[in-house]
Amino acid sequence: MGDTPHTKQLIKNVLIDLCQKQSFQKISVQKIAHE
């Protein structure tokens, strides 16, 4: 089963979304730790 450009774009979007959520959580944890 070959990946279509659309599938690769979806996977890319999911990975970017996960990275953003992880960095957002890290920032939140840092803010809480500072308080």
Image (spheres, rainbow, N blue to C red):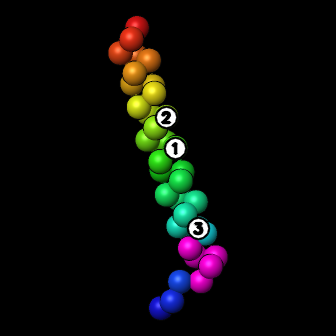
Q: Is 5 inside the magenta-drawn segment? A: yes
Bounds of the magenta span? 4-8
The Cα atoms of the two marked residues, 1 and 2, are separated by 6 Å
Q: Would you place residue 33 above or below residue 6 in this image?
A: above
Mark sitting earlier along the chain (1/3): 3
At mark 2, the secondary structure is helix
At 49% from the left and 34% from the top, the residue drawn is 24
The Cα atoms of the two marked residues, 2 and 3, are separated by 21 Å
Residue 20's disc number: 1
- Residue 10 screen position, x and y as percent: 58, 67
Q: Quadrant of the C terminus?
A: top left
Q: Is residue 6 left or right of residue 24?
A: right
At 44% from the left and 33% from the top, the residue drawn is 25
At mark 1, the secondary structure is helix
Question: How many residues crowd around disc 2 within 10 Å: few (fewer than 14), some, or many (20 or more)?
Answer: few
Mark 1 residue type: Gln
- Residue 34 screen position, x and y as percent: 39, 11
Q: How many numbered badges does the structure rendering display?
A: 3
Q: Which quarter of the picture shows residue 29?
A: top left
Characterize the magenta stretch by its predominant secondary structure: helix
Mark 2 = which residue? 24
- Circles 1, 2 touching at the beta carbon (< 8 Å): yes
Mark 3 = which residue? 10
Residue located farthest toward the left when viewing the structure as drawn: 33
At 61% from the left and 69% from the top, the residue drawn is 9
Question: How many residues crowd around disc 1 within 10 Å: few (fewer than 14), some, or many (20 or more)?
Answer: few
Mark 2 residue type: Phe
At 53% from the left and 83% from the top, the residue drawn is 3
Residue 11's disc number: none
Q: Is residue 10 left or right of residue 30?
A: right
The Cα atoms of the two marked residues, 1 and 3, are separated by 15 Å
